[in-house]
Amino acid sequence: MRLLKAEANDKFSLVEFVDKDVPSYAILSHTWGKDAEEVTFQDLVSGSGEDKPGYGKILFCGKQAVEDGLQFFWVDTCCIDKSSSAELSEAINSMFRWYRNAARCYVYLSDVSIASSTGNGRPSQQMSTRTIQHSRWFTRSWTLQELVAPMLVEFFSVEGERLGDKTALGQAIREITGISIQALQGWPLSEFNVDERLSWADGRMAKREEDTAYSLLGIFDIHMPLLYGEGQKKAFARLFKEIEQSIIDEQSTLTPKRSMKTGCFSRYNRSPNIYNDFQQFNALGGIQNISTGNGNQFPGASLTGPVYLG
């Protein structure tokens, strides 16, 4: 894992760690601007990028990390060498874990201004709720895992003012996203059935169509290679196939005494893209009859039958 190390005078340097040696770090969650506006790994290596609009987000994250007693921090725009398809694939498959393991996650809301909301002074919790509800951050595919994976998620305005954390703003976030309070509080995602987890992605968008599927890998504890150019349909078909295999693997480890949670895909009908993708996958012989391990069979192949995971 490659981290940024905060130095004197608002400077920072790239440092690489093997997993067992990774120190405590903060992590940034944000929405990307135009690609040319973001600071890349190549920019940092060449000592450039300070004139790019995205540089301010990196400075913010570093300063906030130092303020919170952390010397290291991670920003996706520049800590991943995206020119390497192998590194990008490994990073995306590791992303959920990286956010989960972060000491703090800072959500930088570039479209939320305290100055326009409060005039002056720090925002109240009620003001913070009204301020964040229309942020673009809640509509992006990748920010789903960035919200649920870390234990401590704090929201900041474009000025760097703290608006509150996901515990204090939990009810508002639930109303905005449809994500249960328990999931926001860090319950294992295996406690939530497949259709509920899929519903959290409803309406979210990504620059690259395949990322609407790839951004769900961590949500389902799935690892698979990235094939940019395959299109959204094929990306979702592969994702659902991996979910199917996870279900089968899970059933093989169950004992008769172990209780199981069921989920019904038919209840998840708000997002035409994901719903239709699964319907097509199902029609082609997707999740078939699955044994619970005690001799009972459940018809998981139809959208009206129960589907098990975790």
Image (tube, rainbow, N blue to C red):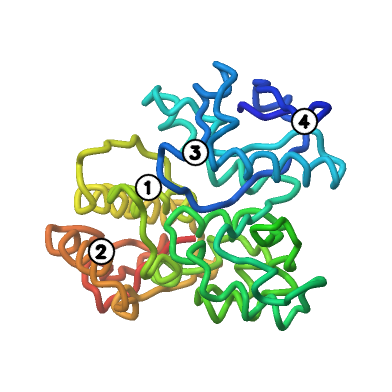
Quickly name the residue at label 3: 38
User: Residue 289 bears which disc, if any?
Assistant: 2
Q: Amino acid at mark 3?
A: Glu
Q: Amino acid at mark 2?
A: Asn
Residues at marks 2 and 1 touching, judged by CB atoms closer than 8 Å? no
CA–CA distance in space, label 1 to label 3: 21 Å
Of marks 4 and 2, which one's residue comes earlier in the chain? 4
Q: CA distance from mark 4 to mark 1?
A: 31 Å
Q: Amino acid at mark 1?
A: Tyr
Give whichever of discs 4 and 1 has the lower sequence position. 4
Label 3's element? loop
Q: Are marks 4 and 2 in contact (CB under 8 Å)?
A: no
Q: Are marks 3 and 2 in contact (CB under 8 Å)?
A: no
Q: Earlier in the sequence, mark 3 or mark 2?
A: 3
**For discs 4 and 2, the disc positioned in front in the rendered view:** 4
Residue at the left extreme, as displayed: 284
Q: Quadrant of the N terminus?
A: top right
Label 1 SS: helix
Locate residue 220 relative to residue 62 in the image: left or right.
Answer: left
